[in-house]
Each structure stands twice: as C-alpha cells, then as structure tokens.
C-alpha cells in the first residue's frame, strides 16, 4: 500500500503557501495581450484544452475561449491593471483593476477581480475570474492553526 508523505507543519505551510511575486511569464504575456486587445496573442497564452471560468460561467476549449475573448474581452475593450500578484503553491493569483465598455450597473466604481491562473508547460490550462467580496474571516487569525 502506497503511503502518503507526512503533512507539513504550520511553519512549513505558512512558508510555502502564498508569496507576492512580480508579474512575469505567460501571465504577463496574457495581461499584456488583453490590454492590447490582441485576440491571437491572448489565445497563444492558452493550452489547446484550457478552460476559463468567468464568474461561474465555464468556457472549455480553444474555440469557445476565442469566442469569449472576441466578444467579452476585446469586444468590450476590457483592460486589467494588476494591483497584486501572488504565487500560491505554483498557481498565480492576479488581483486586477478592471475597466472597459461592459455593463457596469451594480458594480463598484473601482472593480477589482481575482484571476486564478494554473500554468503547465508555459501555457494557461485554467483561468478562473472572480469578483470576490470582503469576508468576515481573515487569513492568519489563528483559526486555521495546526
């Protein structure tokens, strides 16, 4: 029977969990292409079998992602200004200030969205875009201690 490695302790978890990093690699290429409204350059950042979850809407595969990019990203002139970039166990989280020609009714004046990128072989294999709201639970409040 295969055994699983021992779970890391609290100090090890905190040391490896989340680290602020510079924007780089395929994620930087992706955001640069989004801000340039360049459909082909955006698509070049995705793996052929990638998926996107844009606020609870799942978009699977290159053809569907291209249609989403053409209509909702480039078509609505969406721009993303990164305000925070984190590495979380190898995935990249970009919190970005969004703007564009999309319907802004019901949204805050400054819209910050969280973008969760999973990267494999220098391509985006999944991108989840979420409008997060403040939580009553703060990370590091001791509730998650081992």
Image (cartoon, rainbow, N blue to C red):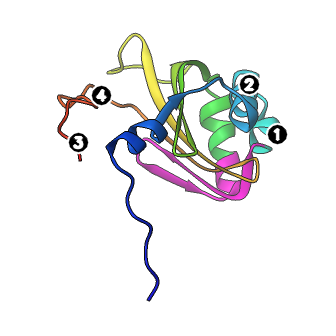
Q: Crowdedness of circle 1 by 10 Å Cα count: few (<14), some, many (20+)? A: few
**Circle 4 residue:** 133
Residue that numbered label 2 is attached to: 32
**Distance in Å between CA atoms under marks 3 and 2:** 38 Å
Residue 22 vertical position relative to residue 9 in the rendered view, above or below: above
Question: Residue at 58% of width from left, 45% of height from top?
Answer: 90
Q: Residue at x 52, y 45 (%)?
A: 89
For disc 3, the marked residue is: 145
Residue 8 pos. (x, y %)? 39, 53
- Does the magenta portion include 91? no
The quadrant in which residue 85 appears is top right
Give the label, 3 or 2, closer to the camera. Answer: 3
For marks 4 and 2 on the same chain, the one whose residue lies earlier in the sequence: 2
Q: Looking at the picture, how far across and down is residue 20, in whole percent?
A: 53, 25
**Residue beneath disc 1:** 40
- What are the residue bounds of the magenta stretch? 45-66
């Amino acid at each position: 029977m295969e055994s699983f490695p021992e779970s890391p302790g609290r100090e090890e978890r905190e040391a490896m969990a989340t680290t602020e990093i510079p924007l780089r690699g395929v994620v930087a290429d992706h955001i640069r292409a989004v801000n340039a409204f360049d459909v082909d350059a955006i698509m070049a950042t995705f793996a052929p079998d990638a998926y996107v979850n844009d606020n609870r809407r799942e978009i699977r595969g290159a053809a569907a992602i291209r249609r989403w990019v053409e209509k909702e990203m480039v078509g609505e002139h969406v721009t993303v200004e990164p305000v925070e970039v984190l590495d979380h166990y190898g995935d990249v989280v970009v919190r970005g200030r969004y703007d564009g020609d999309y319907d802004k009714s019901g949204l805050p004046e400054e819209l910050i969205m969280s973008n969760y990128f999973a990267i494999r072989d220098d391509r985006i294999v999944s991108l989840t875009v979420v409008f997060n709201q403040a939580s009553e639970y703060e990370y590091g409040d001791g509730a998650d201690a081992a």
